[in-house]
């Protein structure tokens, strides 16, 4: 009899993460790769990588959960037993890791959110609605402009002694302000740390506006790998910020835990590369709404379709 | 001779009573604007100032589609906030686009009074007799009142129907019947008949289902297209929904309830905030008192009265420990983003529920 294992996959805009846990919520193995705007192939690569690391002779995958912005597509592709939004997944994962957590700050590639936890239950949350300023994508593009490798960005920022002030209200303004400061001749590290601070300010003024941030505070998402931003948060909030090594996997971990309730006799195989998945988008054209209908094909057989606003779309 | 065509922006099911009264009181051919689609909004926002709020763009799109469809007269609702001033600007934009038409505002920027509506009808049809006007006005009011009453029942139960679509089917048949109303007795008879049919729809409703109240700006509340069918989305999650804003409220009950509402939230609010912003805060208090699980506040981008009320609403909900979510709708709101937030909101309410047990 094989032991049960549960697979959680978080397909974000920038990176795709997978976690396999056992019955006691211990992480058996995990994987992290870039999505490169191709979730189907990213997941294929991810699963074949997992295959090499995972002990499938003693464990059997009994449930799959997907979350993140491509959750529906990948969920249908893998036959997931649960497809859930990333806000809930992150909260569940973090509560399991840090049972006393009160605030989760999360900054990802395209969005940022704050989740408030009261007694192991989400009590409030917010997600950025205005713009992409203060997300990973913005930071990456500005690092490129400064010719800094994003992995070294935090270290360089920490060297700063006099961080510059950057208008943080909006990406466009922040960027032109940054160029202006660079052209005056400010040091790179000062600009880098200025950027970190602007991200934190933008986050606190937009996403976290009106929310009470109580300790313990856990900081997650791709941007939490940037020690410059961590330091800026600590300076601004005057509190200790907890960042764990698996912060970037928390969504996948959370959805894996949630999937445990939806155990099923799965025909899941690690040899997903044998299948060819394809998305074809067609316009409905039956009324002026022109809904985009997403059709998912597995080996050229239609498995699922969605995107219709009315019944006509599926006919 | 071809009759002139009169048109008005579509407002979900209210098309039926508006069309009814216009047909009875004027000699024009009544053609409500087409159902809203993506094209309507694109057309509307193309010709709108960028910072006008969403109803401006939707209705402008409606007008253009109606005019293209042959309408010669257009009727606008008028209203309490800057929507009341949109009339002149929209008229100018449409004239600049080269359309020839007559443009009327139903309530003519006056308080939504019976007299100002009468004056508008007088312009549309100078031969109208006061008694005939009053008769049909009352009949239409009653029709709207019945529709709103039924809608309240539908919102509470549509998420739990056993056969998908049963509510919609009966409602469509009711609206068709209502549009052919012959008089008061006929209307009341039909109402009672359909009320029974609605109550007899088989439901699978657990006793303590999740209950969500929707408060917010009136256009987004009443025009499901503008919120990507928010209520339907919630119903699909098996949620009981309450929403206060409807035409009955706007035309009749609003003026009587103002003092009651203000008393309800005297700790938070001393004056009205324009449009329905103060009312929405009071409604939130009512929902809290009734033990609802969560409140969703909706508004179009740039809605000034509601923005003024939001902070107060937030304070109230913080004090009462009530989950509250703000949703703002604009021309380029991502539908997936809304769905993600709604789903997370529902999960959160569910978790809180399970935790209380």
Image: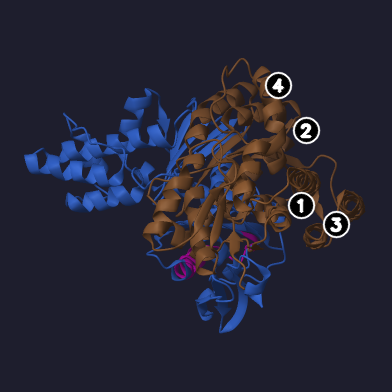
Indicate the position of residue A19 as horizontal and vertical percent values: 53, 55
Q: Secondary structure at mark 4?
A: helix
Q: Earlier in the sequence, mark 2 or mark 3?
A: 3
Which of B100/B302 is in front? Answer: B100
Q: Nearer the viewer, mark 1 or mark 2?
A: 1
The answer for how far apart the CA atoms under marks 2 and 3 are is 53 Å
Q: Secondary structure at mark 2?
A: loop
Circle 3: is it few (<14), some (14-19), or many (20+) Cα within 10 Å? Answer: few
The answer for how far apart the CA atoms under marks 1 and 4 are is 31 Å
Q: Which mark is residue B182?
A: 3
Judging by the rendered image, the residue that carries numbered circle 1 is B159
Q: Nearer the viewer, mark 4 or mark 3?
A: 3
Residue B318 visible here: yes
Chain letter corresponding to the colour brown? B
Residue B334 visible here: no
Quadrant in the picture for residue B206: top right
Q: Earlier in the sequence, mark 1 or mark 2?
A: 1
Q: Earlier in the sequence, mark 3 or mark 1?
A: 1
């Amino acid at each position: 009899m094989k032991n049960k294992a549960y697979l959680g996959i978080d397909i974000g805009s920038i990176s795709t993460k997978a976690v396999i846990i056992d019955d006691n919520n211990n992480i058996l193995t995990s994987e992290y790769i870039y999505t490169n705007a191709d979730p189907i192939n990213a997941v294929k690569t991810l699963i074949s990588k997992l295959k090499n690391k995972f002990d499938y002779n003693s464990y059997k995958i009994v449930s799959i959960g997907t979350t993140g912005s491509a959750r529906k597509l990948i969920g249908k592709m893998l036959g997931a037993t649960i497809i859930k939004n990333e806000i809930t997944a992150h909260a569940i994962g973090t509560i399991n890791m840090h049972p006393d957590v009160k605030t989760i700050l999360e900054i990802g590639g395209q969005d940022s959110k704050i989740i408030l936890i009261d007694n192991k239950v989400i009590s409030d949350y917010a997600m950025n609605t205005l713009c992409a300023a203060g997300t990973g994508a913005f930071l990456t593009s500005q690092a490129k402009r400064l010719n800094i490798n994003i992995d070294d960005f935090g270290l360089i920022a920490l060297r700063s002694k006099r961080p510059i002030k950057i208008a943080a209200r909006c990406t466009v303004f922040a960027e032109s302000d940054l160029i202006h400061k660079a052209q005056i001749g400010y040091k790179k590290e000062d600009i880098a740390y200025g950027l970190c601070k602007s991200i934190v300010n933008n986050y606190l003024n937009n996403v976290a506006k009106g929310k009470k941030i109580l300790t313990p505070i856990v900081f997650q998402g791709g941007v939490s790998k940037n020690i410059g931003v961590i330091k800026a948060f600590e300076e601004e909030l005057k509190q200790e910020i907890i960042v764990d090594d698996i912060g970037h996997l928390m969504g996948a971990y959370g959805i894996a835990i949630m999937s445990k309730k939806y155990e099923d006799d799965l025909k899941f195989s690690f040899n997903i590369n044998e299948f060819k998945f394809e998305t074809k988008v067609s316009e409905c054209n039956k009324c002026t709404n022109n809904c985009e209908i997403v059709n998912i094909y597995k080996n050229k057989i239609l498995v699922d379709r969605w995107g219709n606003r009315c019944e006509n779309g599926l006919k | 001779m071809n009759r002139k065509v009169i048109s008005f922006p579509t407002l979900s099911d209210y098309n039926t009573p508006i069309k009814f009264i216009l047909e009875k009181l004027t000699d024009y051919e009544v053609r409500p604007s087409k159902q809203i689609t993506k094209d309507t909004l694109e057309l509307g926002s193309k010709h709108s100032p960028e910072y006008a709020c969403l109803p401006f763009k939707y209705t402008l799109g409606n007008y253009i589609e109606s005019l293209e469809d042959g309408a010669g007269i257009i009727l606008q609702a008028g209203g309490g906030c800057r929507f009341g001033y949109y009339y002149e600007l929209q008229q100018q934009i449409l004239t600049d686009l080269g359309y020839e038409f007559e443009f009327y505002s139903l309530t003519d920027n006056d308080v939504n009074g019976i007299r100002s509506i009468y004056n508008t009808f007088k312009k549309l049809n100078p031969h109208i007799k006061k008694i005939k006007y009053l008769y049909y006005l009352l009949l239409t009011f009653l029709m709207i009142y019945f529709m709103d009453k039924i809608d309240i029942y539908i919102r509470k139960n549509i998420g739990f129907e056993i056969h998908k679509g049963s509510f919609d089917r009966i409602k469509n048949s009711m609206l068709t019947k209502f549009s052919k109303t012959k008089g008061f007795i006929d209307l009341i008879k039909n109402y009672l008949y359909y009320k029974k049919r609605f109550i007899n729809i088989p439901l699978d409703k657990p006793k303590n289902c999740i209950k969500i109240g929707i408060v917010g700006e009136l256009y987004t509340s009443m025009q499901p297209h503008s919120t990507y069918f928010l209520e339907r989305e919630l119903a699909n999650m098996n949620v009981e929904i309450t929403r206060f804003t409807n035409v009955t409220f706007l035309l009749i009950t609003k003026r009587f309830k103002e003092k009651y509402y203000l008393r309800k939230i005297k700790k938070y609010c001393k004056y009205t905030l324009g449009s329905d912003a103060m009312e929405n805060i009071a409604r939130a208090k009512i929902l809290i008192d009734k033990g609802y699980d969560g409140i969703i506040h909706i508004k179009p981008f740039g809605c000034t009265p509601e923005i003024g009320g939001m902070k107060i609403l937030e304070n109230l909900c913080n004090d009462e420990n009530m989950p509250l979510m703000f949703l703002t709708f604009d021309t380029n709101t991502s539908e997936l983003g809304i769905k993600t937030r709604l789903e997370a909101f529902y999960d959160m309410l569910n978790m809180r529920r399970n935790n209380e047990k």
